[in-house]
Amino acid sequence: MPVRRAALTCCIPSLRTRTSAQAGPGMTRSERGLIERSAMTEVLVLNGPNLNMLGDREPEIYGSLTLADVADTCRTTAAELGWELDFRQSNHEGELVEWVQEAGRAQRDGRLIGAVINAGAYTHTSIALHDAVAGSGLRVVELHISNVHAREPFRHHSYLSSVAAAVLIGFGVAGYPMALRGLQALIAPANEGNLS
Ligand code: DHK
């Protein structure tokens, strides 16, 4: 699925015109922290197998919106938060693993806030994705459209939850923008020291 990007704007209107180079001694620690964070401007949304079929696939469970509709919503939310959006989908486990590894490097370099990941069925099977998240240190919000705990028992276990910073389940596709806002809450100064 092609990568989609959102326009870059700063989420903190009063800081919109400042850059980290302009962070000066007169600023509070929290202001400086906000500026540093606002320089980390990309966010990744990763979708696993069969999510390219959203809209057609079991609409009574996954809804009638397509993945392109979800990408549009995420782009709007990311722009509101001041982030550039990188929205991807793959049916291939190895490709998802590589994207997680790349994202971990981007996060370490300060270019990425973190990722929202709906790994689809790989959630329940993929030790490789678990290891990629653990090894890369990527800040992840695990997302599921449906309430997996109210479904078949094989959907009750997730290999991602233990390495995710947070988990959001069962809000339909409305969960995607909620998860992006959740990522912002995770990096907020009030949560400093609680980041995974
Ligand atoms: C999506 C899938 O494709 C399933 O394999 C998971 C998840 C649930 C979701 O609810 O988004 O079990």
Image: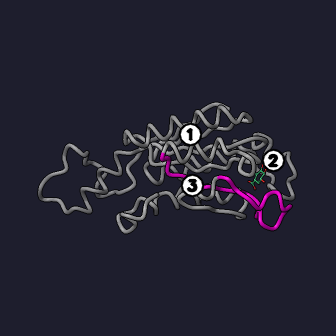
Q: Secondary structure at mark 1?
A: helix
Q: How is the image coloured?
A: one colour
Residue at mark 2: 55
The picture places residue 42, in percent across and down from the top left corner, at 46, 42
In the rendered view of the protein, which quadrant contains the N terminus?
top right
Residue at mark 3: 163
Report the residue at 40% width, 42% height from top. Answer: 108
Calculate the distance from the C-alpha at mark 2 to the C-alpha at mark 3.
29 Å
The tag earlier along the polypeptide, 2 or 1, is 2
> Mark 3 or mark 1, which is nearer to you?
3
Q: Is residue 26 left or right of residue 12?
A: left
Residue at mark 1: 100
Outermost left residue: 25
Q: Is residue 116 left or right of residue 23?
A: right
Report the residue at 25% width, 60% height from top. Answer: 31
Residue type marked 3 = Val
Residue type marked 1 = Val
Report the residue at 67% width, 48% height from top. Answer: 70
Over which residues does the magenta segment extend?
Answer: 137-159
Report the residue at 19% width, 63% height from top. Answer: 28
Of residues 121 and 5, which is closer to you in this image?
A: 121
Calculate the distance from the C-alpha at mark 3 to the C-alpha at mark 1.
12 Å
Q: Are marks 2 and 1 in contact (CB under 8 Å)?
A: no
Tell me: is circle 3 under 8 Å from ligand 1. no
- Label 3 packing within 10 angstroms: few (<14), some (14-19), many (20+): many
The picture places residue 167, in percent across and down from the top left corner, at 61, 61
Calculate the distance from the C-alpha at mark 2 to the C-alpha at mark 1.
26 Å
Residue type marked 2 = Gly
